[in-house]
Image (tube, helix red, strand yellow):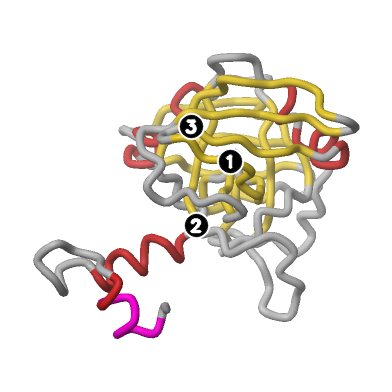
Amino acid sequence: MFTGIIEARGEIVSTEPRGGFVSLRIVSDLDLSDLRVGDSISVDGACLTATKVEADRRAFSADVSPETLGVTTLARARPGAKVNLEKAMRLDSRLGGHLVLGHVDCVGRVIEQRASGNGFLMGFSVDSGRYLIEKGSVAIDGISLTVNTVDGNRFQVMIIPHTAALTGLTEKKINDKVNVEFDLIGKYVEKLVSGKTESGISERTLKEYGFM
């Protein structure tokens, strides 16, 4: 599990197909002194397993499964591409963002980007906005962000200068693709209450389970 607080940027230096999987070798300035083979690491929001950590602790390798290739932008990853990195959270650390599983729900598309004060307003479109709420959380390329507005399957977020500098998100151009993970709370609530009534979620059901 992750927090959506990006620790460093990395660069993909090689991609190697392996029987339906793709092995990525990534170099970065991220402190890998405590990363071990088998540990989880978020690469552009996708939870991957480290398969090799090099002796100089500046590079690691991770395999991308066919499932992950099918639902993330990593299927189009090429040498030279920059990616956001975050090691798995520790239970004794602060939760600075929100609970992020690293299980990407869909690939979104950049539809808007403009300066707004000292920050940047960015808009995205996704297949469905069912789990998006204003002032709720969303992870984009592994970055924990607050949803400003929602309009159907489109939503906006504000990027502060620190996040822009650390993640490179504002370098994206219109129609570029991003990995999107919706807040897991909404998905669990829907699973819990759906099917309890013929019409699915109702006010009565929400009250019954203590959500109202």
Please provide percent x and percent y for residue 45: 57, 45
Residue occupied by mark 3: 154
| Residue kind at label 2, given as amino acid type | Asp
| Residue kind at label 3, given as amino acid type | Arg
How far is disc 2 from disc 1 in space, using C-alphas?
15 Å
First of labels 3, 2 by sequence position: 3
Q: Nearer the viewer, mark 3 or mark 2?
A: 3
Q: Is residue 209 above or below residue 121?
A: below
- Helix, strand or loop at disc 3? strand
Mark identifier at residue 149? 1
Residue occupied by mark 2: 183
Kindly indicate whether the residue at mark 2 contacts the one at mark 3 (C-beta within 8 angstroms).
Answer: no
The magenta segment = 205-210
At x 61% / y 46%, what residue is drawn?
147
Judged from this view, the residue extending furthest toward the left is: 198
First of labels 1, 3 by sequence position: 1
Please provide percent x and percent y for residue 4: 66, 54
Q: Residues within 10 Å of mark 1 (few under 14, many from 20)?
A: some
Q: Nearer the viewer, mark 2 or mark 1?
A: 1
Relative placement, left or right, of 185 versus 67 is right
Please provide percent x and percent y for residue 72: 44, 34
